[in-house]
Amino acid sequence: MPDPSSLFRAIPSTDKSLEALRKALSMRQDELSRAILKAPHALVREAVCAYWDAMRLRVREGRVKDPAFLSLEARLSHLIRFVGKYASPRLQKVINATGVVIHTNTGRSVLAPEAREALQLAAANYTNLELDSATGGRGSRNSLLAPLLRTLTGAEDGLVVNNNAAAVLLVMDTFCKGREAVISRGELVEIGGSFRIPDVMSATGVHLREVGTTNRTHLKDYAAAIGENTSALVRVHTSNFRVIGFHKAVDTEELARLAHEHGLILINDLGSGSLTDFVAAGLPGEPTVQQAVAMGSDLVLFSGDKLLGGPQAGLIVGRADLVARLRQNPLLRALRCDKLAYAALEATLRLYLDPERARQGVPTVARILARRDEIEPRARLLAQLVQDHAGEACMISLMEGSSRCGGGAFPEYPLPTILCAVHPKETTPEDMRRRLLGLRPILIGRIEDNAFCLDPRTLEDEDFPLVASLVARALRDPHKGLG
């Protein structure tokens, strides 16, 4: 049993490690080496220290017994990989082959090319975000997109904040603070990350008056709950779950009529929200934003980065007098979007002026509407590329499968697809998945029927060669962890 002190002495100094790292990287021409050489020196030094700290922990745990294992000659290749991962930017590109179109873990919607161009313009230049081009004085960002929102939704006015939770917060604070809002018990939903809609509403000081039961709420339940302290009726789309069977909900027109008869407003939180009817994709007829406005909702709230296919934002459309009051709320400054979000959102909304262009040009919409027969030839092409790159390391097959909209939209309605299934020979699908998470860019898929599956629905054709290369690397890379 070696003396632990001799093992600790075998660990090279940070300076020697940095010098060996510099020499090794200068002789290599791969992407990883270039990335490390470009990284700030302080970050690289921190990474080297972290690597050897991990080795010291191994020594203390008795997992290292040979001093030679700790030499720079033995550890250098592992050190390079560790430093490369440690010193790389925390926000990394992910190739999404899961078939989940609005993938919350990866940032939800992919932006249209027009939105990316608008982002580049806004990022590289000053903009007229709050410049009145008529006077040269101060303008307001809060009315920038109002004309587009009016045209697209049929509402009298519109406003943008930084996400839909912010939209809920602003609306409830403006119209319901210190008063009651009536809501169906079946709509008090919790969505991703233990985020509860009623918690946001209650944070503004509103008292939520729950009516009905989990599965059935009638118009008379709302009517009986209205009192002198009632400020609004509230509808919340259940988004990521669905009640089926013995179920009853009041339609929006009836709810709006009841609200207006009592001098109240109807606040309609659509959650994902959409300007597109997805019935053509075999999905149920969910109300679009336009329909929610036409059915009498006074304020309609929805997300920008879900079914709309834009950047993260919360959109509020409705009556002009109500939106004007929202603009006067001091909270709006804390909830406003920056110029990048406005640029990408405007470019996305402009595509919807031509509905057919939106169906083809907004990636989220196009991917949801893609038919199985359109995906199958792409799956065959992907399968061939993966087989060519991976060779004998795996077998490839095509499998019938289902994609998902994601983002809490249409949770019970799968989208038929064809999967490229990778059957590794020397490892397991789970080990493949783990290795792919450690590569750059990161590739994510899903495991079904003991295969690592790639769904072309959420891939672009130009992704295919890189996907094939990453799969081949994951199949052949023998290294695990620190070595």
Image: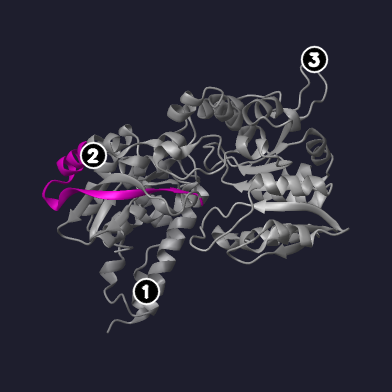
At 83% from the left edge and 49% from the top edge, which residue is drawn? 262
Which residue was labeled with disc 3? 134
The circle drawn on residue 413 is none
Q: Residue 428 location in percent, x, y?
A: 22, 62
Mark closer to the chain start, 2 or 3: 3
Quarter of the image for the C terminus: give it. Answer: bottom left
Mark closer to the chain start, 1 or 2: 1
As helix, strand or loop, the secondary structure at mark 2 comes to: helix
**Quadrant in the rendering for residue 121:** top right
As helix, strand or loop, the secondary structure at mark 3 comes to: loop
Name, please, the residue furthest toward the bottom: 1
Name, please, the residue furthest toward the left: 392
Q: Residues within 10 Å of mark 1 (few under 14, many from 20)?
A: few
Q: Residue 63 location in percent, x, y?
A: 32, 77
The circle drawn on residue 58 is 1
Can residue 90 be seen at all in this image of the molecule? Answer: no
Mark closer to the chain start, 3 or 1: 1
User: Relative to the observer, which residue lies in front, 331 or 243?
Assistant: 243
Residue stretch rendered in magenta on the structure? 379-408
Specify how the rendered protein is coloured. Answer: one colour
Tell me the amino acid under the disc marked 1. Arg
Which residue was labeled with disc 2? 382
Residue 38, magenta (yes or no): no
Report the mark closest to the observer, 3 or 1.
3
At 37% from the left edge and 67% from the top edge, which residue is drawn? 11
User: Relative to the observer, which residue lies in front, 415 or 375?
Assistant: 415
Name, please, the residue furthest toward the front: 220
Report the mark closest to the observer, 1 or 2.
2
Q: Is residue 482 left or right of residue 208?
A: left
Tell me the amino acid under the disc marked 3. Ala
